[in-house]
Image (cartoon, helix red, strand yellow):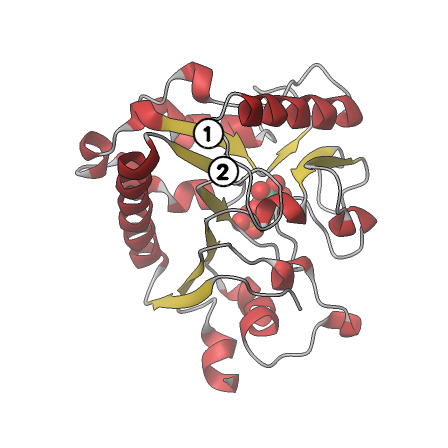
C-alpha cells in the first residue's frame, strides 16, 4: 500500500447529491485559501462521473463567489481523441463545468489532440515544465515534482485512478511527469496520464467515489478487503502532501461500514 505522507480523511454522505454539495463547498473553500495565500489556484480534473458530481460548484452561491479568473485547469488523464469527441475528458469538463464559469482560456491546459499518445504525453510534460520555469507551478520540496494545489480524482471498479491501471506497467513510472498508454483496458485505448510522483505531490487530493459498483474497491482501499490477486490496485497508492479526502456516498461506503 502507498505511504501516506499527509493527513487522510474519509467523509461519508447519505447520497450522491450530498457528496456534490460537500465537494462544491470543499473546492470553493480551497480556492479561497490558495488564492489568498499565493494568488492562484491550480486544479487538476479527472474525467468520468466526477464532472457531474462537481455540478453544485457552478450553481449559486459558488458560481458568483469563486474567483474563477485565478484558476488554472489541468487534466490528470486524457483520452487521445479530438477535443470535440464524446470520449474526450476535456469535452466532458467543458460541457459540464468550464462553459459555465469564466476561467481564462489561456489557463486551461487541454492536450494537443493532433499528436500521437507518445507525442501528446511529451508535449503535456514540456508545458508543465514551462509552468514550473514561469513559477506558476512550484516544485514539491519533498519529491521535486510539480506541486498542484488540488487534484480531483475518481476511481474505476478495478481500482484505477487517472489512467493508471492495475495491469499496466506505467502505473510504476517514477521518472516522467506524464506518460502514455496505447492499450487501456477501459476504452478508448490511447490515453495520457500523470504519473504517481506528480499525483502524490499535490497539496490536496479529493477521491470522489459514489455508487455501489465501487463498494468492494473502497473496502480494498480503506477497509479490510484483500486486494484482487493479492496485488494492491492503484487507488491504494494515492496520498497527498497535505490532505487526502475521500468523499463517499452511502452505496460506495456500504461494504466498508459492514466490514470495518
Ligand atoms: O476512464 C476514466 O475513468 C476514471 C473513473 O471514471 P468513473 O466514471 O468511474 O468515475 C476517471 O477518473 C478517469 O479520469 C477517466 O479517464
Q: Residue furthest bottom?
A: 259
Q: Residue furthest front?
A: 141
Can residue 132 be seen?
A: yes
Q: Residue at position x 62%, y 26% from top?
A: 129
Q: Give the tally of numbered discs.
A: 2
- Classify residue 111 by image quadrant: top right
- Look at mark 2 in the image and give the residue it sits on: 44
Residue 34 rendering spot, x and y as whole percentages: 33, 40
Q: Please state, as top left, top right, bottom left or bottom right, where the N terminus lies in the image.
A: bottom right
Viewer-closest of 50 and 178: 178
Look at the picture and state if 38 lies above or below 185. Answer: above
Can residue 100 be seen?
A: no
Residue 6 rendering spot, x and y as whole percentages: 48, 61
Q: Residue at position x 55%, y 68% from top?
A: 218
Q: Is the C-beta separation of discs 2 and 1 under 8 Å?
A: yes
- Classify residue 178 by image quadrant: top right
Q: Is residue 81 left or right of residue 173?
A: left
Secondary structure, mark 2, is strand
Residue 73: give its label.
1
Look at the picture and state if 191 lies above or below 82. Answer: below
Residue 211: give its label.
none
Question: How many angstroms separate mark 2 from mark 1 (CA)?
Answer: 6 Å
Q: Is residue 182 left or right of residue 216?
A: right
Secondary structure, mark 1, is strand
Q: Residue at position x 69%, y 21% from top?
A: 123
Look at the picture and state if 152 lies above or below 247. Answer: above
Amino acid at each position: 500500500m502507498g505511504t501516506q505522507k499527509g493527513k487522510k480523511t474519509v467523509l461519508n454522505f447519505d447520497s450522491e447529491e450530498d457528496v456534490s454539495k460537500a465537494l462544491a463547498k470543499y473546492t470553493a473553500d480551497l480556492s479561497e485559501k490558495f488564492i489568498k495565500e499565493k494568488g492562484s489556484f491550480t486544479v487538476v480534473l479527472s474525467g468520468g462521473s466526477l464532472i457531474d458530481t462537481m455540478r453544485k460548484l457552478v450553481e449559486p452561491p459558488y458560481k458568483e463567489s469563486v474567483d474563477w479568473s485565478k484558476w488554472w485547469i489541468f487534466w490528470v488523464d486524457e483520452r487521445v481523441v479530438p477535443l470535440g469527441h464524446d470520449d474526450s475528458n476535456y469535452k466532458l469538463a467543458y460541457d459540464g463545468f468550464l462553459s459555465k464559469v469564466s476561467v481564462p482560456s489561456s489557463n486551461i491546459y487541454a492536450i494537443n489532440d493532433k499528436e500521437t499518445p507518445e507525442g501528446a504525453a511529451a508535449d503535456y510534460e514540456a508545458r508543465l515544465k514551462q509552468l514550473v520555469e514561469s513559477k506558476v507551478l512550484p516544485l514539491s520540496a519533498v519529491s521535486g515534482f510539480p506541486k498542484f494545489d488540488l487534484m480531483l480524482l475518481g476511481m474505476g471498479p478495478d481500482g484505477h485512478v487517472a489512467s493508471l491501471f492495475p495491469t499496466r506497467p506505467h502505473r510504476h513510472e517514477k521518472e516522467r511527469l506524464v506518460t502514455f498508454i496505447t492499450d487501456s483496458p477501459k476504452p478508448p485505448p490511447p490515453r495520457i496520464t500523470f504519473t504517481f510522483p506528480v499525483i502524490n505531490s499535490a497539496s490536496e487530493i479529493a477521491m470522489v467515489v459514489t455508487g455501489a459498483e465501487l463498494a468492494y474497491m473502497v473496502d480494498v482501499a480503506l477497509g479490510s478487503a484483500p486486494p484482487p490477486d493479492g496485488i494492491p490496485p492503484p487507488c491504494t497508492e494515492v496520498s497527498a502532501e497535505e490532505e487526502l479526502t475521500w468523499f463517499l456516498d452511502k452505496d460506495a461506503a456500504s461494504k466498508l461500514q459492514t466490514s470495518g
